[in-house]
Amino acid sequence: MSKPKVAFFDFACCEGCQLQVYNLEEDILNLLELVEPVEWREAMSDKAEKYDIAFIEGSITRPGDEESLKDIRERSTMLIALGACATIGGVNKLKNNFDLAEVKQCVYSESAGMGHLETSATKSVGEVVKVDYHIHGCPIDKQEFAYIVRCLALGKTPVIPNHPVCVECKMKENICRFEYGEICLGPVTRAGCGAKCPSNGMWCFGCRGYVDNPNVNAAREVMDQYGKTIADLQGKLKLFGSKQEATDEMA
């Protein structure tokens, strides 16, 4: 049986999620027994016309990028959003809170008029094309990536967590970050990272996006319990949650 042909593409991002794939080191060799990379700018010069699995890293910020993404989707059997920029728009969505012309001028100054810098509102990959699976995080968890690839190569459906980071924190017996006077996004953020930030002395930044149907009432109760306001919470949500539904629900 032939191996699934996989390809990697990147749009507006730091390409840190692809770096996590490299960080698998020797485990990459094990994955190569299951899949065949046929296009990957960071690793090879080969090109291909069709892909069994296309991994997309980065958010969509230019009209031309939307067309390129749609073309990749048409040539792919399965398309996977890789990392926060692709799954939820990432920190790039912060610009959607401002006038785009002002943002462009602020970033590019006298070069703002150059054609290739034409910009539009930032979108996640799923806001432009159909996405089959999401690999969350900023950056992604390399072991979760390997697990998902193995599942798909073997014809299995990967299980992607849909419960809050708080569950993982409790399993690790972490002291709640709210006890330190911080505002943590664990109550509304999708688990699967192993509660890395809270386990290492930081509040959850929400890089894995919201769980489906986040319990906003529970989040309000936590904020009330620790003397925090919804405005405080919304300020934290903007980093990875700009222009997402849960932000408005918590108003």
Image (cartoon, helix red, strand yellow):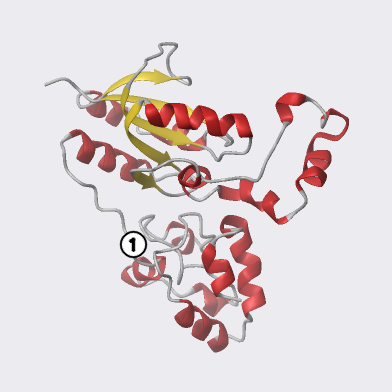
Q: Which residue is mark 1?
A: 162
Q: Residue at x 53, y 82 (%)?
A: 220
Q: Return the residue nearer the eye: 197 or 21.
A: 21
Instruction: Please state the horizontal and vertical placement of residue 39, each as a whole percent of the image.
Output: 39, 19
Task: Tell me the quarter of the picture where residue 151 sits.
Answer: top left
- Left or right of 16? Residue 181 is right
Task: Tell me the quarter of the picture where residue 80 sits.
Answer: top left
Q: Taking the image as drawn, is residue 22 in sight? A: no
Task: Tell me the quarter of the picture where residue 111 sits.
Answer: top right
* Mark 1, secondary structure of its residue: loop
Crowdedness near tag 1: few (<14), some (14–19) or many (≥20) residues, C-alpha within 10 Å: some
- Left or right of 182? Residue 37 is left
Q: Residue at x 65, y 45 (%)?
A: 121
Q: Mark 1: which amino acid?
A: Asn
Instruction: Please state the horizontal and vertical placement of residue 147, each as a whole percent of the image.
Output: 26, 42
Q: Return the residue nearer the eye: 34 or 251.
A: 251
Q: Residue at x 63, y 35 (%)?
A: 62
- Left or right of 89? Residue 6 is left
Q: Quadrant of the C terminus?
A: bottom right
